[in-house]
Image (cartoon, grey):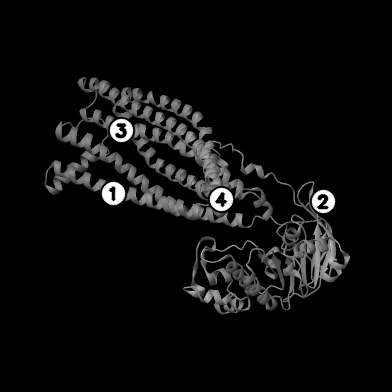
Amino acid sequence: MENIKPKKDHSVFETELSGAVLNFQLLTRIFFWLRPYRLKLVLSAILVLIASFAAVLLEILISRVLVDYIIMKDSDSLMPDLGMISLTQFLERETQLGDLFSVGLMFFLITVIQGVAGHWHRMTLTASIVKGLRDLRQDLFEHLETRPSSFYDKVPVGRLMTRVTNDVEALFEMLRGFGSLIGEFIPFFVALAIMFSASIKLTFILLTLIPVVWVVTFIFKGATREIFREVRDSVSALNQRLQESLSGIQVVQLSVRESRNFLDYSVLNKLNRRLEFRSINISTFYGAFNDSLIAIGLGMVIWFGAEEVLSDSMTLGGVILFTRFMTMLFTPVVSLGEQLNVLFRAMASGERIFQALDWDEQIKEPESPSPLPERLLGRIEFKDLSFSYNPGEPVLSNVSFSVAAGEKLAIVGPTGSGKSTLIRLLGRFYDFSDGSIFLDGIDLNQILSKELRRRVGVVLQDFHVFSGSIYENISLGNPLVTKKKAQEAALITNAHDFISRLPQGYDTVMLERGANLSHGQRQLLAFARVLAADPEVLVLDEATASVDTETELLIEKGLENLIENRTAILIAHRLQTVRKSDRILVLNDGKVAEFGTEKELLSNRGLYHKLHQLQFQDK
């Protein structure tokens, strides 16, 4: 039987994306996260206007004022000087310090204005972008936290890590680059207007190079569009392989698989290197071509500008102004072409980010959830429950049984019989529709998953330790779990003794994956964590499978207090740990094979009897 949840194609997280060069809908979505900081962005735009206009004035001071007015004594030229000559004359009259000093003073003041405005612009722009992408990263992280287990069963974590880290960083580079590009295009238009007023002929000659730049840029765009998407995919594959290898480093080292993993990683790394080299070669050629084009433009200015000067059609300062403005004319075009490199990466990255944000797979929550009482009794009933992770591959088939309030139930069976799946469904980690599960008579599908998980405490075999102190790992940020309550939970579960022996006790900071604790200590810590949350239903999924005998005795002693007045479900392969249970459920191939007390099951001489004989035949 199938889940009610529609089957989704998770393979899209592995496939290449279209990476449209200019996806305006995507850009609009990105700017949504910048809206709270729009006033800073407006301020940044004003500042870049000031800095850009100051850059134009500096070139006017050098060419029109210093060269034409002061050195060549030519103040009658029709070329615009934006009032700089008049301002110089005013300063001469007011200060009586000479024309050179007046020009120098103006140059200094405008340079300071340009520097301050430019720096302030960059700071406000960067701050706005960083804050906006911080919000985006937080929203993406929050969204991924709420995806169900079925999502992470199919999607590699390394791929998702790339979206939260590398892809968001690519958006930052794009937004910062285009913000800076605005500051380059403002001088472009001002310079173009002045150049037309100085020499229409020479301006048109230089403008003939602009189409060449755009044609080359178009070719560059076509050559890099696919390669940069392939680079991003190769980086994602590298992250995935790195995460897999390092998270399972102990298995890698125990199986002496380092060389094999290194070989696999090297293959992906070499592919990434080849792709990066291809992108670098194309980008380098593009940059060299543009540099050559600027040199050609400079030669044309000197050649044709000299004729203009000799024929008195242009002043020497005008030619110099053309050479200075030529950089303002070509730099934005070249920068735009180079920014396309970043744009291609960012468009693909944006698609990947919003693909994850738009992934709506989640546990189906009830529209009108049933309220839970202040304290549950802990009655559990599975009724005709069938479930499959994949179509046509049933894991559970028509499972029915009940657990009385306060009862200890053990679930045993061969590997793959569906024991852990029962617990995952009890915790609402997966949706199910074929059959029902009731908690105190309330259908689990009518209970909010968060409310349910507060009342059902689960101790897994693979206990996860978070960064932080021992106390923080017990409380998990729950304000109701004070340090005193955490200590009480540790005392009951026999974890207090080893915690007290740690250098800082409950304030001892855990190393990554709890490396400064033994496996048994981590398991005891897991019991303390669950007990501190005070759930009415307790589930132990192979919780003592990898614990030494001495530690297991400590755990069993603590469990006697832990399960008091609670419904407890214990999943274990080791039958020694379930013999004190009230009843035992035996699963086989996803079906209930046997159900009853140990005495009843042994007398039936069925599957449990066979498992019992296999484990205790030498005793």
Q: Earlier in the sequence, mark 2 or mark 4?
A: 2
Quarter assignment of residue 576: bottom right
**Label 2: how many residues lie within 10 Å, few (<14), some (14-19) or many (20+)?**
many
User: In front: 279, or 316?
Assistant: 279
Per the rendering, the mark at residue 62 is none
Residue placed under numbered mark 4 in the picture: 252
- The answer for how far apart the CA atoms under marks 4 and 3 are is 61 Å
Which quadrant holds the C terminus?
A: bottom right
- The residue under label 2 is 1
Please report contact status of discs 4 and 3: CB closer than 8 Å, yes or no: no
Identify the secondary structure beneath mark 3.
helix
**Identity of the residue drawn at 80% across and 60% down:** 587
Residue designated by label 1: 113
The percent position of residue 261, horizontal first and vertical second, equals 54, 44
User: In the current view of this chain or complex, which residue is farthest to the front?
Assistant: 618
Q: Which mark is residue 325?
A: 3
Q: CA distance from mark 4 to mark 1?
A: 60 Å
Disc number lying in front (2 or 3): 2
User: Crowding near pointer 1: few (<14 within 10 Å), some, many (20+)?
Assistant: some
Local secondary structure at mark 4: helix
Asked if the residue at tag 3 contacts the one at tag 2, i.e. Cβ–Cβ closer than 8 Å, the answer is: no
